[in-house]
Amino acid sequence: MKKALLLFALMVGALISAHAQVVVSGNITTNTTWTRNNVYLLQGFIYVKNGATLTIEPGTVIKGDKTTKGSLIVTRGAKLIADGTPFEPIVFTSNEANPTYGDWGGIILLGKAATNATFLGQQGVGEIEGGVNNAEGDGLYGGGSNPDNADNSGILRYVRIEYPGVAFQPNSEINGLTMGGVGSGTTIDHVQVSYCGDDSFEWFGGTVNCKYLIAYRGLDDDFDADFGYSGDVQYALAVRDPQIADQSNSNGFEIDNDAQGSNNTPKTRPTFSNVTIVGPTGSVNNLYRRGAHIRRNSEPGIFNTLIVGNYPVGFFIDGNSCADNATNGLLEIKNSIVAGPTDLLTSNANNGFNIDTWYDSPAFGNKQFVTNNEAKLVDPFNLDYPNVQPVSGSPVAGMGAFTAARINKPFFDKVNYIGAFSGTGGGSSDWTCGWARFLDLNTSCFAGSVGTKDIAAYATDIKVYPTIATDRATLEINLVESADLQVDIFSLDGQYFGQQVNENAASGQQSFTLSTSQLPNGFYFVRIQVGEAVATEKLIVVR
């Protein structure tokens, strides 16, 4: 065992040393590209400004410095193009040897779309939280009296943001991904925020649309919207650690019009669909509050959504203004399930609003269950390897509906299930495959997860040797019949290292040479696809 641990340490050291570290401590004012062969260290607040574009190659790792509160702020008019792939995600993470919540700042995108905020008398302009504004106004967002709702702040696709949320000062933290006045020309797609010291995702005004979001084991809220955010979000997952919650109280959704609950426009009116929020269970931190806290005159739409876990409260409609919005059809919860909270539905409105009567209206298609198990998910509360796919007989199947006006639009996929996953099998339904990380890189979907084909029907006696390779390894496989065979290699972090085999292979015992001469020292997965079935084998490269 000691020899194995020593070997592991040597390999990790070799893997790190294979990439040069580049310290970034100054503003980015001209078009700049960060490449996958380097590791970039953010020291202090790094502003992308003066209309510059920062492009980051797939597979690049960026680390935030804890001492200087390393953060990346993309100012109005500038762009961030972080366009990863499923096998080469772009990873923002901590520089600490033992990383934890709030080790660095996070990513802040600032755009010119509409907001109901006001800054020093400028209506439609806000100062983003986190203490990043300066004398040049690099922390301001929104287009003022002439907003551009189609503004483009760039692309974040297949991106992980790990251990962000540093506290600039008490109760003034930077979120994992902060979007201030970000317009609909921006692409936010397949983004995971993990172990964040504040909110995982927060929208301050703006119109940006987002798909495939993961909030994993955050401290405060998972999805927070305010100051006039009116974009659309489909497919989002939140998984909570029952022991970790914030002093400000932790919620799945937290949605406000503004801090005063005013009638300022544009109103906070986001539309969420196909969200799965896995709340705390077991021994729960007493700072947890609600699966969804809807307050301060906001007008959200929550559709086709599943909230499970032992929150004290499931859906909480807070205040008379939100109750009136619900009664008048401006605040909507439809075709959704809440299962497990102590109090499934609550409202403190004193204007005659009855949340149970409203939520249970037959036209809304909602359901509520006392226990978590009634949602019938595979293994949602496994923090290391959460599997929130529905099993056979789950009530999420067939519940999806997109008839409401605000959700009947081209952005939304018209699926027939609620929650973030269909449960119909394999990588086609588990959009976390390859790029996302829970305890480890999520490769379970490539190796026989719910609904995938049984590899034994296609191939037997699969073996990759030697397990510890230098320049080459051998794949042996016995094919039951001739079949299309694809073999790919990717690292533990999801970086794709190319295809080794792609052919129609004959039946019987086959042997293939895998070249490892170009691979840096480290751990790898060999992904073997035979017809419709997939298996993975581990490989270690050491020289």
Image (cartoon, grey):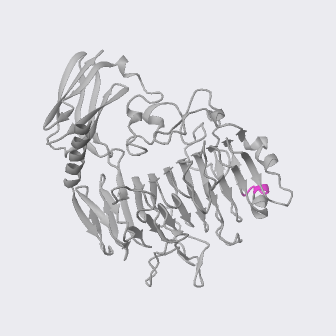
Q: Nearer the viewer, residue 311 or 374?
A: 311
Looking at the rendering, in which quadrant would you find the N terminus?
top left
Tell me where residue 308 sits by quadrant: top right
> Does the magenta segment cover residue 308?
no
Q: Residue furthest front?
A: 2
Is 210 located above or below residue 123 in the figure?
Answer: above
Q: Nearer the viewer, residue 110 or 97?
A: 97
261 left or right, relative to 195 = right
Tell me where residue 514 sits by quadrant: top left
Residue 515 location (% of width, % of height) = 16, 36
Residue located at (79% from left, 56% from top): 327
Q: Nearer the viewer, residue 304 or 520?
A: 520
Residue 516 location (% of width, % of height) = 17, 38
Magenta extent: 326-330
Q: Is residue 382 visible?
A: yes
Residue 58 location (% of width, % of height) = 31, 53
Looking at the rendering, in which quadrant would you find the C terminus?
top left
